[in-house]
Amino acid sequence: MAKAMYVPKESQPKQGKKGASSDKKDGKRKMVAQNKKARHDYLIMDTYEAGIVLTGTEVKSLRQGRTSLADAFVQIDGGEAWLHNAHIPEYNQGTWTNHAVRRKRKLLLHRDEIDKLESKSQETGHTIVTLAIYFKDGRAKAEIALAKGKKEYDKRQTLREKQDRRDSDRAIAAAKRRQRNNERMG
């Protein structure tokens, strides 16, 4: 007589560390800060994802969701990418190990990406801006972009296009509502 084997249900979550850590490994972003002004002021040509070298208190402060990218920019020095002027405030429970608020932080990119960014950023009107800082798989990442500054009339044109798109979406939604109401009445 053969013994019956116990087969756990697949629908039940597994216990232990493997089941708990699988939720974090889905590649989703946990957004910490965005630089919306950069998308308004610059024409984004190409985006890159870069790792950020941080100290312990900086990571803890980022996890609290407190940072500002208003003045942040990227500069290539000696074949390395550096993030300047990103404001990560001091950690509340930090002691003498707290970090400097606006220190320059190293960005981790592939060599060919750094070379491409360096050559493109030396062209007139091009710069490298920081668009966002987020956590991906538990690691701090920065979304940086090669960008070209917009002229004032370009900014106005973008705002006009955005407003026109909103108006047309509103008109379509209103027409659909009227059509549904007419169907109900008739």
Image: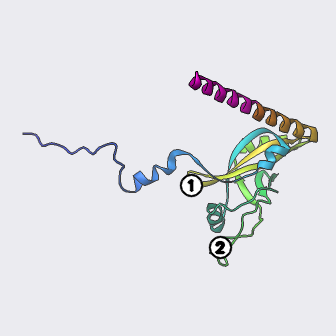
Residue appearing at x 43%, y 54% in the figure: 20
Q: Is residue 2 left or right of residue 90?
A: left
Name the amino acid, label 2. Asn
Question: Looking at the picture, how far across and down is residue 138, in whole percent?
Answer: 56, 55
Judged by its main secondary structure, the magenta piece is helix
The magenta-colored residue range is 168-186
Question: Looking at the picture, how far across and down is residue 84, in whole percent?
Answer: 79, 58
Mark number, residue 92? 2
Circle 1 Cα neighbour tier, 10 Å, few/some/many (<14 / 14–19 / ≥20): some
Residue contact at pointers 1 and 2, CB within 8 angstroms: no
Q: Judging from the image, what secondary structure is the residue with disc 1 in? A: loop
The answer to which image quadrant residue 104 occupies is: bottom right
- Reply above or below: 165 against 103: above
Task: Check residue 22 for magenta coloring.
Answer: no
Q: Is residue 90 left or right of residue 183?
A: right
Question: Looking at the picture, how far across and down is residue 38, in whole percent?
Answer: 80, 47
Which quarter of the rendered picture does the N terminus lie within?
top left
- Reply above or below: 162 against 16: above
Q: On the image, numbered disc 1 is attached to which residue? A: 138
Question: Looking at the picture, how far across and down is residue 181, in whole percent?
Answer: 61, 28
Pick whichever, 105 or 150, lies toward us.
Answer: 150
Q: Residue furthest left?
A: 1
Q: For marks 1 and 2, give the CA distance.
A: 21 Å
Q: Residue furthest top?
A: 186
Residue appearing at x 65%, y 73% in the figure: 92
